[in-house]
Image: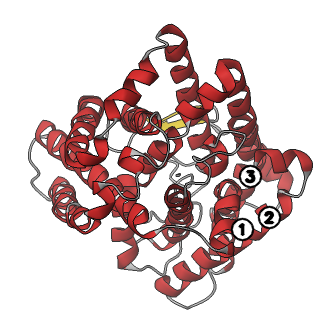
Amino acid sequence: MHAPLKSLETPAPAGPAARNAPIGAMRAFLTLLVIAHHAVLTYHPYAPPPKAFTAAPMLWPAFPVVDSQKFAGFGLFVLVNDMFFMSAMFLVSGLFVAESLKARGAGGFLKGRALRLGVPFVIGTGLLAPLAYYPAWLQSGGEVSLGAYVQAWTHLPFWPSGPAWFLWVLLAFGVVVTALDRVFPRLIPALGRWTQGVARRPGRVFLVLVAASALAYVPLNMMLPFGYWTTEGPFTVQTGRILHYFVYFLAGLAFGAVGMGQDLTDPQGRLARRWWAWQIAPVPAVIAAVAVLIVTFSPNPPPKPVLDVAGGLTFVLACAALTFAVLSIFLRFVRKTGPVGRSLQANAYGMYLTHYVFTAWLGWLLLPESWGGLAKGLAVTVGATALSWLLTMALRRLPLLGRIL
């Protein structure tokens, strides 16, 4: 259940921040990663076999459809992707908060977020999630009956929200930052002053981000089971990462407080100029994180505290390294976008909201085919991208949805 986007945070009226090509392209890229992530989970080599819809533990919210045809490479893709893509989405979303708060004020900012995040969250959890999980009901042996499915759904101990979980967390972060800004009105300007000139010291910023996220993630992660999620009704979040995500959101807020296209997000800055070095940095970090994971599931693993600390530190290191690697690539090579790129950026938010329906249903429709896991995974990724893209283009023609999407 994963993955935010241009429409979430871009202030109105559109200014330099909204037109920043590298950040816009990065947001679109992260959206495509979300779609691919959910598409290939069906063919993950360790995807759990289907079982009864209400049997514990309920793993179908993460794996709505499971195909017997697998592809081992998708396991590595999902693992590496999960190390950074949601954190990067929170960072990118935070980039636009300072300017939006300044332009709209606290009331206008919260009203805009309630419209752009709260309304889609209600639609996503109330309509899109049940529609996306219907194939899970069918694969678990449920009868082809809408009434039976609704009855089973309403008797679940929680309300699966799918990827919409990101929206309520982002909304909550916005409320917290707005409250902080009201109580400490000099905080955001101070963050902006602190980040001025940061383009000359991206390595130092990287280390600060790693240290802050380690303090936020490692202690909390040590107190919780591996991969634990908290669910209260439709409000779902990966508990051990909530403070880590908030750190990335605040980092984006700090970087954006000086203005988009400046300092760390400057296409002419040191981060962009030394993009090649930042592509090397994730390699040892990812290898270390994978090694810790392998040792964790070995026959004789070290004590849990050792694994928690090692796993936590390698995770935050890999997360920051991958995020900076992706950011540096887009800052270095994206100067402008063509018609296709502009369309993808404009429709990315709607694609995030709707894609889960298509990844689940396409995975279920392809179950009888014998194409192999790789071909099916690629087909579902391309199909879900195209269908969610086209659907969003159509929905944006509607007055109210056009404002939101």
Residue 273 appears in which quarter of the rendering? bottom left
User: Where does residue 220 sit, x and y in percent of width and height?
Assistant: 29, 29
Q: Which residue has dot 3 on it?
A: 128
Q: Is residue 53 above or below residue 105?
A: below
Callout 3 environment at 10 Å: few (<14), some (14 to 19), or many (20+)? many
Mark 3 lies on a secondary structure that is: helix
Front in this rendered view, residue 48 or 82: 82
Q: Is residue 45 visible?
A: no
User: Where does residue 60 sit, x and y in percent of width and height?
Assistant: 55, 55
**Marks 1 and 2, how far apart at CA:** 6 Å
Q: Is residue 211 visible?
A: yes
Front in this rendered view, residue 67 or 81: 81
Mark 1 lies on a secondary structure that is: helix
Give me the residue at 52% from left, 21% from top: 176
Q: Is residue 49 left or right of residue 191?
A: right
Callout 2 environment at 10 Å: few (<14), some (14 to 19), or many (20+)? many
**Marks 3 and 2, how far apart at CA:** 17 Å
Q: Which residue has dot 1 on it?
A: 389
Q: Earlier in the sequence, mark 3 or mark 1?
A: 3
Q: Which mark is residue 393?
A: 2
User: Where does residue 84 sit, x and y in percent of width and height?
Assistant: 37, 53
Q: Is residue 256 left or right of residue 225?
A: right
Closer mark to the observer between disc 3 and disc 1: 1
